[in-house]
């Protein structure tokens, strides 16, 4: 499983299809429209089944955030927030081959990933992709804290965490023992985020009539 993406790339197939047998087999395969489906008699669904070919459908993605912990060893933990969801269009999930059942959402806390991801942005995360691909952005739980970082593998099962704002937040190195001791775990790969402009532009001066 740790090398699934590498194997999928060698075989020129999507990693999700290789893992579960679901979704599009080959990267870049176009989504078939309803009109094309009707015009092609070979692409039919079994009797009694319904094929949803519409890409303009919204799905509710569970929302996760830091909450107060009952444990005395750490003040917070990352948990699902009941009755809170983020609505995403299926085209966003299909563009990155993410299953709706494996997508979760979370907030960006702090400016460690600014200006690429601003504080307060909403993130969408593929919880099925927890193995490390160097340089990708992941959501992590670090001793009860929700953190968003670039992640790199290090020798002897260590990791390096890097912020986009690395001048203010230097790189962090953790060996295998520290990962276990500080309860560092990858929640998933960040594949989408929303970012608002930090300021509203000022009104232009009106020219004198």
Image: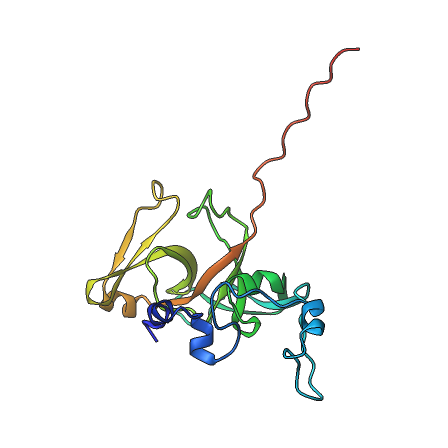
**Residue 208 versus residue 34: which sits nearer the camera?**
34
Q: Residue at x 34, y 64 (%)?
A: 132
The residue furthest top is 209
Where residue 103 appears, x then y in whole percent? 53, 68
| Residue in the picture at 43% in, 48% down | 113
> Looking at this view, is 15 or 180 the one in front?
15
**Where residue 199 sits in the image (x, y, percent)?**
59, 36
User: What residue occupies the far left of the structure in this picture?
Assistant: 156
Q: How is the image coloured?
A: rainbow
- Kindly indicate the quadrant of the structure image that contains residue 130: bottom left
In the picture, measured across the screen, residue 153 lies left or right of residue 58, that is left
Relative placement, left or right, of 198 versus 9 is right
Give the quarter of the figure containing the C terminus.
Answer: top right
Q: Residue at x 70, y 81 (%)?
A: 50
- Could you tell me how many numbered marks the image carries? 0
Q: Residue at x 53, y 54 (%)?
A: 193
Residue 91 drawn at (x, y percent): 61, 62
Apparent side of residue 161 relative to residue 31 in the rendered image (left or right): left
User: Which residue lies most toward the bottom here?
Assistant: 47
Return the x and y of residue 149 as percentages of the image width and height.
39, 55
Q: Quadrant of the N terminus?
A: bottom left
**28 to 70, vertically: above or below:** above
Answer with the quarter of the image where residue 128 lies. Answer: bottom left
Nearest the camera: 18 or 103?
A: 18
Residues 58 and 178: in front is 58
Quarter holding residue 81: bottom right
């Amino acid at each position: 499983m740790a090398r699934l993406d590498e194997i999928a790339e060698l075989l020129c197939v999507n990693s999700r299809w290789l893992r579960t047998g679901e979704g599009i087999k080959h990267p870049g395969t176009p989504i078939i429209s309803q009109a094309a489906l009707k015009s092609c008699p070979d692409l039919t669904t079994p009797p009694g089944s319904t094929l949803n070919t519409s890409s303009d459908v919204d799905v509710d993605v569970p929302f996760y955030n830091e909450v107060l912990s009952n444990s005395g060893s750490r003040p917070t933990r990352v948990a699902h927030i009941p009755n809170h969801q983020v609505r995403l269009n299926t085209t966003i999930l299909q563009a990155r081959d993410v299953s709706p059942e494996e997508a979760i959402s979370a907030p960006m806390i702090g400016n460690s990933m600014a200006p690429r991801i601003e504080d307060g942005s909403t993130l969408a995360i593929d919880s099925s992709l927890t193995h490390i691909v160097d340089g990708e952005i992941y959501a992590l739980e670090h001793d009860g804290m929700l953190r968003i970082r670039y992640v790199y593998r290090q020798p002897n099962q260590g990791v390096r965490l890097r912020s986009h704002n690395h001048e203010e937040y230097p790189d962090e190195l953790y060996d295998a023992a520290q990962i276990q001791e500080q309860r560092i775990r990858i929640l998933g790969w960040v594949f989408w985020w929303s970012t608002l402009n930090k300021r509203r532009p000022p009104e232009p001066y009106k020219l004198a009539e």
